[in-house]
Amino acid sequence: MAHILALILTALVVCSPAFALWPLPKDLQTGSKALRLADDFDIQLSVQRAPADLQAAVARTKGYLKTDKLQRLVVGRGENDRTAIKSAKELSSLTVSLTSNETVRSISEEAMDALEDRVETYSLTVPGDGSDATLKANSTLGLFRGLTTFGQLWYEFDDITYTLEAPIQIKDAPAYPYRGFMLDTARNYFPISDIMRTLDAMSWVKINTFHWHIVDSQSFPLEVSGFTEISGKGAYSATDVYTSKDVEEIVSYAAARGIDVMVEVDTPGHTDAIGQSHPEHIACNQGTPWATFANEPPAGQLRFTNTATVNFTTDLIAAVAKMFPSKYFSTGGDELNEACYAADTQTQQELNATGKTLEQALSTFTVSTHQALLKLQKTPVVWEEMVLAHNVTLSNTTIVMVWISSDDVVAVAKKGYRFIHAASDYFYLDCGAGGWVGANPSGNSWCDPFKTWQFSYSFDPTGNLTTEESKLVMGGEHLLWTEQSNQHNLDPIVWPRAASGAELFWTGPGKNISTALPRLHDVAFRMEQRGIGTIPLQPLWCALRPGTCDLTA
Amino acid sequence: MAHILALILTALVVCSPAFALWPLPKDLQTGSKALRLADDFDIQLSVQRAPADLQAAVARTKGYLKTDKLQRLVVGRGENDRTAIKSAKELSSLTVSLTSNETVRSISEEAMDALEDRVETYSLTVPGDGSDATLKANSTLGLFRGLTTFGQLWYEFDDITYTLEAPIQIKDAPAYPYRGFMLDTARNYFPISDIMRTLDAMSWVKINTFHWHIVDSQSFPLEVSGFTEISGKGAYSATDVYTSKDVEEIVSYAAARGIDVMVEVDTPGHTDAIGQSHPEHIACNQGTPWATFANEPPAGQLRFTNTATVNFTTDLIAAVAKMFPSKYFSTGGDELNEACYAADTQTQQELNATGKTLEQALSTFTVSTHQALLKLQKTPVVWEEMVLAHNVTLSNTTIVMVWISSDDVVAVAKKGYRFIHAASDYFYLDCGAGGWVGANPSGNSWCDPFKTWQFSYSFDPTGNLTTEESKLVMGGEHLLWTEQSNQHNLDPIVWPRAASGAELFWTGPGKNISTALPRLHDVAFRMEQRGIGTIPLQPLWCALRPGTCDLTA
């Protein structure tokens, strides 16, 4: 019996990809030759006036090749490869070049254009005979994506860095332009080192947008020039604040890794933190019972019926927008609570005085804040309620984020807006961790159950959409709301799970979960080697025996 | 409105205990005077021939008083206490003494007797006028519990260590002798530093038993003298092993912190790792489909119908038992899979040859392994199936762990055995994290939902039991099964959540969740100051405003 099992296990190992590419490239050809990196292996950057961030990316890639030391996840961890790799051909060089050197832009510049210009294409060839490997793209961002892929081709055993699948030929491009990750830094604060580390992990799986839900009702940790009193009173402490220097550092760190930072200043709801310094702008400021006036404590929303508040918010959004080079800016717009405004005497007086309905006032407010963004050549992004629950005038360039349910996708598409998949029923990383509203013994997570990587991975971005509607899909993202998160569980909650969305929206849907799992184990282990606190998807026994722990195995 | 809210918030703050005792002492009297530690504050150990572990505990307590630097979790973090604490009386000394110096035993020795001898009682007096504080107990373990309590009395602001509730008088003793925490180190391995850190955190909330589920079917990370081939082949790697030196270190580290290490060698199921070195002892060794032969992969159970296997297991258990000084030893006994034995030719032949039923053979096997424990003066501990699902001869001193469901408690009590609450529906920390068996997109956690601290805390240890049956309750424990855990999410999954069980079984049930929450926030923040990766139970906004985020607030 043991012998038969050994045969079965061998068969399973052979069936699964022997290297850990994630996301899987669009077009991938592999052989079955062993190939090892020469001791003096080098990456030759054949780009005129190579931008500093491209040079840095090459240096990082070379570093990872030395420090990853990722052994194959099989029984014996590469012991059985010993003979093959000792006698393998050696690869001495990877040559990196642009297909045109006409206008060489930096990765950072191109990262700002990834959603429109599709500049992430690359091709990578690793011959099996030891002759030089080549990486080509028509953009430095494409080269960066290719370098990331190159860094995933290799395992280590006995100080030898090798693959068993040479020659390798890859032609790659993303299925969707937007692959994001959202972090909420308002429910609980995260030091910038945590954000930097997260950006690194994101870049390794080719996520290209950091959707930064930076402020909310609980705290306002962003220091905004001209509005410093808001973080002064609304941040959790004087140190729990992102200064303009912090933002600059994060934006440039992200950009150098092919990531655009799309900030969100959620309005008109989720703004009670502004009430700490500007109670005049906030209706039902910390009003009780909170559950009547908000979906979570504290209640408090911008008095958008008030002209001074509209101007204040518009100026605030313009000021924040100037801190972020991204061409996208989210003004939020979720969970507007009407009971709050109904109970607010000032709002009711202003509606009576102007003869406007609440909806009309909301539209005036939104047009004003969005106009400020459009003036700055930025595209407004909103949560789905702004097109499904309200009657608000929006630019037709507006991008919509579907969050409440994936069932709402069709309705958003029917409105004709471009949109991003961020549905709670597939992509909310915080679901399943229990309720947190105090004295509530039977309170579970509102969006139970936990969204497994398998479930996110099985999502169909164009399900129930017509061909025409499908063109409106920008991509998607995983999201972490942080009522019960801080720096200690950031990595374990996010990684490697959020990588499932990264592959779904890069490679496209419909991929096999069983063959993805061993690669995702590799993602987790490689990330861990690089300092991310990833968690195991299974007992190591399973990780070492691809397929064996499948429910049907 | 802001003014009224301020009043409400003040009222809430006053109602909640201003210091962070956890678990709440049995009898607690507090005043409302400010008291600060003098710069030269010292702990005077007035114990003749004070054992080294008691001296070390005093030193650790003094260290925490200096390094905790825990600010009060209120808006302003103690700013409003400034005036009161500047002019507060100073406490210069805590005198620690035994009520009898006749036979002074070490904490470590007494930790072995905590379940039988109730040696955890202490009394602590902190006068409000600056005169010396006193801690008394009739055991060094009691003194250690009191030192732990003393260390929780203080906040820090502006380099002043203070309380606002002097005088304080505490008479304390646990409601239940057993307060445990179980860690599985077989699904995934944990370095000993993680175990040490966990033991520290356990001791801070007066948990007194580390239930170490050390081996299982996935791996056997315990090096056992005379059986080194088992870990040699059954551990995940040569370094993923607990040597006898490691065990000694862990046991002595635990004991010095008032914690008994109760090891579990689960039998006859959950033993496939033994099959790597001893296939002759294992039925359906890695058999497929695994789901037919086991609740999780890999399948493989001890051939308990075989005399050689009975002897092998008995010797193994005796050898492991000798590594652990605890008077308790769990032989497991959960999830015995009958289909595995039905499909095992050897087992069937042996049953035919002996004329025994499977149940009779199981009883012979269990009597043999338990006899080995009884000979070593150890009490056997078993999972509930051994008394509810099987007809096995057991010593009436046997302790039963209820795990499948809290509904099974009554049936176990009716059998007359002492038992420990470890029910999956209240105390399993891994629930709610999604399914992990490979290609299974809609697979959720089998024991959904996530068990919140509030839910564990609301458990009634004697619910549905008669007065007589209630005497059989030894206590209870939280448990972490680690299919999806490693060192990165150990702390975030366990802390502060497992503290809810610690208070439930020390202080007794029926305590108010709303007033517990601010104290539990303090537990989380104090643990974090001491190096535990605790997670937030709520947004910091809520933690700073006790009661405000309750669902009914």
Image (cartoon, coloured by chain):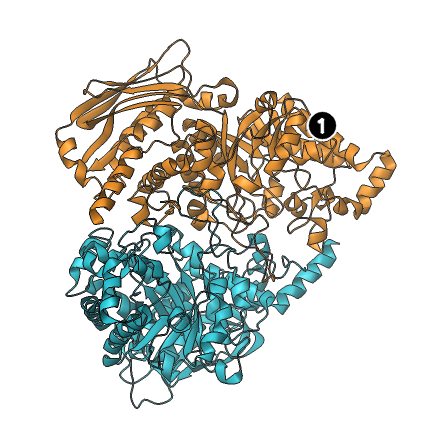
Chain colours: A orange, B cyan
Image quadrant in which you'd find residue A534 = top left
- Look at the picture and state if A287 lies above or below A310: below
Q: Residues within 10 Å of mark 1 (few under 14, many from 20)?
A: some
Q: Amino acid at mark 1?
A: Val
Whether A429 is drawn above or below A83: the answer is below
Q: Quadrant of residue B293?
A: bottom left
**Quarter of the image containing the C terminus of chain B?**
bottom right
x, y (%) of residue A369? 68, 29
Q: Is residue B207 left or right of residue A327?
A: left
Label tally: 1
Comparing B152 with A295, the one in front is A295
Looking at the picture, how far across and down is residue B312, in whole percent? Answer: 19, 67
On the picture, is B76 further left or further right than B140?
A: right
Q: Position of residue B151 (x, y in %)?
A: 43, 70
Q: Nearer the viewer, residue A386 or A249?
A: A386
Q: Residue at x 36, y 11 (%)?
A: A99
Residue B17 seen by the camera: yes
Residue B258 seen in the current view: no
The residue to which callout 1 is attached is A367
- Up the image or down, B425 lies above or below A367; here it is below
Q: Which subunit holds the residue at mark 1?
A: A
Residue situated in front as seen by the camera: B95 or B515: B515
In what element is the residue under mark 1? Answer: helix
In percent of width and height, residue A367 lies at 71, 27
Q: What residue is drawn where x is 48% and y is 41%?
A: A455
Q: Name the image quarter holding the N terminus of chain B.
A: bottom right
